[in-house]
Image: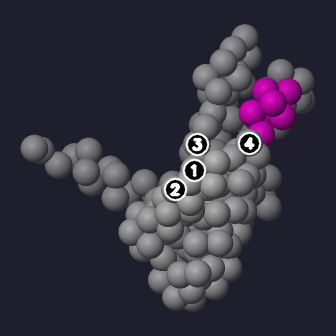
């Protein structure tokens, strides 16, 4: 088990140093499911070792997301709270490095009303456009490049 922990630590360091190229004094935003907390913490530690200013964690939970889609008032899928807009858009404007750890269970949203999901994604795309533009722009350029 100790060898696995060492490999995960090395992977976290590689993600931070090479994948994100974290610079001294830069803020690092880590988005992670709660199930991946131990690895997210290794990444945070590696970011601090690289000299980052601060690591900001943004946790997600599939089970809570499912409950929200199934039971929340329908109006919540047509709005993005101001705090959420500011959180993501402001970190993007600041030039924070962003690491997304994704381990979503594909069955999580099974039997959820797709209209709720579409509405939530549509409004988030609109309200968080500066955030998405900052972090997705390099990938858009790659997709448009003819090989």
Is residue 130 something one can see in this rendering? no
Residue under label 1: 4
Magenta-highlighted residues: 60-67
Mark 2 secondary-structure assignment: helix
Question: Badge 1, how many Cα within 10 Å: few under 14, some, many 20+?
Answer: few
Residue under label 3: 102
Question: Badge 3, how many Cα within 10 Å: few under 14, some, many 20+?
Answer: few
Residue under label 4: 35
Badge 2 or badge 3: first in the primary sequence: 2
The residue lying toward the viewer, choosing from 25 and 115, is: 25
Of circles 3 and 1, the one toward us is: 1
Mark 1 secondary-structure assignment: helix
Q: CA distance from mark 2 to mark 1?
A: 5 Å
Residue 69, labelled with which disc?
none
Compared with 27, 4 (above or below) is above
Residue occupying the point 34% across, 52% down: 139
């Amino acid at each position: 088990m100790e060898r696995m922990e060492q490999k995960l630590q090395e992977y976290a360091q590689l993600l931070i140093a090479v994948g994100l190229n974290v610079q001294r004094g830069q803020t690092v935003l880590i988005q992670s499911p709660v199930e991946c907390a131990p690895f997210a913490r290794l990444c945070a530690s590696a970011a601090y070792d690289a000299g980052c200013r601060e690591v900001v964690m943004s946790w997600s939970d599939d089970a809570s997301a499912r409950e929200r889609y199934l039971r929340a008032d329908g109006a919540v899928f047509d709005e993005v709270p101001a705090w959420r807009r500011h959180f993501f858009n402001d970190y993007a404007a600041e030039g924070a490095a962003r690491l997304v750890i994704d381990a979503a269970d594909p069955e999580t949203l099974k039997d959820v009303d797709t209209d709720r999901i579409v509405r939530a994604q549509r409004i988030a795309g609109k309200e968080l456009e500066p955030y998405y533009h900052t972090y997705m722009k390099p990938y858009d350029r790659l997709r448009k490049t003819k090989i």
